Amino acid sequence: MIAFENLEVRYAAASAPALKGLTLSLERGIVGLLGPNGAGKSTLLKALLGLLTPSRGSGTVLGVALGAPEAARLRARIGYMPEYDALIEDASAYEQVAFWGELSGLAPEAARDRAHEVLYFVGLDEARYRPVSGYSTGMRQRVKLAQALVHSPELIFLDEPTNGLDPDGRRRMLDLVLRVHAELGTGVILASHLLGDVERVADQLVILDQGHIKAAGSMAGLRKILARRVELRFLDPLDATQEAALTELGAVLEARNGLYDLELTEADPAGAFRWAQARGATLVQVTPRHDRLDEVLLRALHPATSPVEA
Amino acid sequence: MPIYAPTLPPAPDLHLGQPPALVIMRFDLTRLWRQKIGRFFGFAFLMMLLWKVARIYVDHLLQTNQAFKPMQEFAKTILTQGADFQADLLNPASYLLWFLVALIGGGLVARDTLYRVRPLMYAHPVAPKDYLLAKLGFASALPFAILLPFALLPWAMSLLLAGLHGPVWATAPLRLLPAMAVSSVLMGSVAVGASSMAATPRAGIGWVLGLVLGLGTLASMIHTLTGFRAVDGLNPVMLAEAWPQLLVGVDHPLVAWVPAILGTVLHIGLWTFVAARRTRPSEVVI
Amino acid sequence: MISLDRASLRYGPILGLSPTTFELPDGGGITGLLGPNGAGKSSLLQLLSGLLPPSGGEVRVFGEAPFRNATVLARLGLVPEGDRLPMGLRADRWLRMMGELSGLLGEALKSAVARALATVGMADRAHLTFARMSKGMRQRIRLAQALLHEPELLILDEPFNGLDPEARLTLIALLRDFAAKGTRILVSSHILGEIAQLTDRILLLFRGRLLAEGTVTEIRQLLDRHPVELRLTGAAQVLARWAVEQPELAALRMEEGAVVISVRSPRDILPRLQKAAAEGGIPLSALDPLDLNLDAVFQYLTKDHA
């Protein structure tokens, strides 16, 4: 889907590069893009849209080399859902989605048909004919998603799609993101500040900071299973003697909110069941411990403490 | 008997669309339709048009009906004649039309600024010049379309009633249409330039009215104080009215040829430049 | 420490909070205040922090009504929602001003500001104006403001909004730290993941009413309409054969190298499962309760009452 080789991008010839030597290869999937504000996420987007020409190195997006004349056409093949409210308040959802479709190069009739189709896809049924100024936050976010999908792009860039949504709205938006990839085969780049969102939907991860890639790769590759580490939870809280006796099982690295993070002395996690049986506790969770996304992120942003391999 | 999956059908062709500028102009037109500010203006302009057409008919009656013979001389003194009459056909190009242009044109760019639509537009295959072209085109086409019946209906009526000897010259449209085009582009560029400086549509209306009336007042003040007539070339209202006069060749146009050309070029150039600067993609968000 | 007795809040005709009764005991720890948009989270926090009097009923914080009550307000700290600050002002000067409003003066004020800044890790950057700070830095200054008078109860309304991931993690670590030192903390958020990282004790509001209060595990066990889903990892065939013989089984689903069972009363089946695994009767390498988390509890509760 995307391949960068030492890609460097500047806004003006004299200015400092905004993206510094990016080498990256992403398969078509759902890519989580993490990084502090000002890390270079919007510059990356502009490079993807073919709006910026690389000053050094090379990049290929959807099979088109950046800087080539055809790169201008990339914008018709990519959908963009901005973070801010880019809605035309006095127009209905249907009208504006059709309008954006036409701007991407659809014929007027085709744009109207597609507008209806994508609005059904995102779950806006009757409301589509009303001006969007009366919409709830969840509906507005869905109009923005429909707008990004109307021309059936091969890749969509979603910037904070769950902003301002409550848990239910957030779950539904993330389900939609999963469906966009699973049912339409569209590649997705999801920029988010919420690690939970990225963890839920992404299969690849890019961590960007100050124009550099700090970590990139598949989710499974970056979030390794930690050997001999397990997380335990019990049906009832442990009493003091039981808690103290946990050391028989291994070293307790962290205990919080009833969840114990242990490094086992023996490799077999089934030993936990024997221990609980002997100590009169009832286990409700015994799971191998993965790297958590927040640990991956902190290690990537502060490599001085412990380096992460890309 | 197949079962069709309830997902989106295959991708439609992306190369059959209309040029972006045309798409944006069409969208602005449907938007204008919805705003329903046409009723008052429609009525006002219709009344004016009826008055112009009625005058042609009255003139025709005076010329042909012997009963009105005594009134003919009197009529000549109160009705404008010759070149002045031709130029007068377009006189709605005064405050009412400016007001309409301000009301509609003032929101054209400002509304997109308020809703933050422009960055998203530039993420589509839309170049800044497409956008500018669409807005300028729309703001200029609007006054042109309103003036069109004023130039053509009295002319057709006069041809029909009195042939080549009617009160409207047979060649009048050849002179009036270019004059209308210049005035309309002038109005459009002032409106778009002012609108691009505003943050909300309402402020946009204020900007257009403020610019037009302010420049007009300033120019006429300088004119009165110094007696320097050419300074009226800075007054957009006078410029828009002067072009029909210049092209039909009246004896005493509001603004002479040289200041009119200079002033018009200055206004169109300046406001187009301002609009282009204010609507170009920013570095922060696309 | 906090108690509400049929306390309600209306803004003119608009409902903020329906008459609500509950009590939060003394002692440290973090309580997460959850609910969809418009559920009444901000209304409850406004009542507790004494910004508004209840329209009906009684609110008590430290045993007294908090509205316009200086003795209560002196013991609680509030970080309100939003990011509105005088942008041109230096953070340390703003803090000093806020400290003066709390009645601190001279040396006491100076040391309070220095201590609060050190706690939030902003001592070296407090001379910057707010305009030159990132959102995360501003949020930490706002937190320092609430800590100036060393409150026993800290109330935060949507403190994570708009922060980038690292700033979120820093704030979570800070709050955990305070809780460990004995400060009682009440945090509202509509992002479940953040609350789950902070605490497992929640107050769940829905449509202006209190739906649940307690730890996630406790609340989940009360939701006995919903069978608990357990993923058993190991030799799936053998595990499935064991599972179908259990009377509590409601449903069973096979996965690659695992079997997911839905059981009605986990209290009965879990000890038996544990015994079988301990004695080597079944090859169980991992046990994962799929809906024993905040997300599932939230979803069940709000769906059941919708």
Image: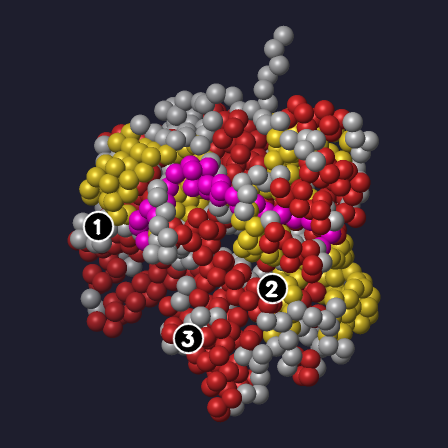
Instruction: Pick whichever of labels 2 and 3 is earlier in the sequence.
Output: 3
In this view of the protein, which residue sits in the foreground, B7 or B169?
Answer: B7
Residue hosting label 2: C157
Give residue B87's position: percent from left, percent from top.
Answer: 31, 46
Residue hosting label 1: A12
Q: Is residue A137 magenta?
A: no
Crowding at dot 1, Cα within 10 Å, few <14 / some 14-19 / many 20+, comes out as few
Crowding at dot 3, Cα within 10 Å, few <14 / some 14-19 / many 20+, comes out as some
The secondary structure that most of the magenta stretch takes on is: strand
Chain name for mark 2: C
Q: Is residue A228 magenta?
A: yes
**Are the residues flagged by discs 3 and 1 in contact, CB closer than 8 Å?**
no
Residue hosting label 3: C123
**Amino acid type assigned to the residue bearing label 1 in the image:** Ala
Q: Which residues are magenta?
A: A210-237
Give residue B240's position: percent from left, percent from top.
Answer: 31, 51
Same subunit under labels 2 and 3? yes
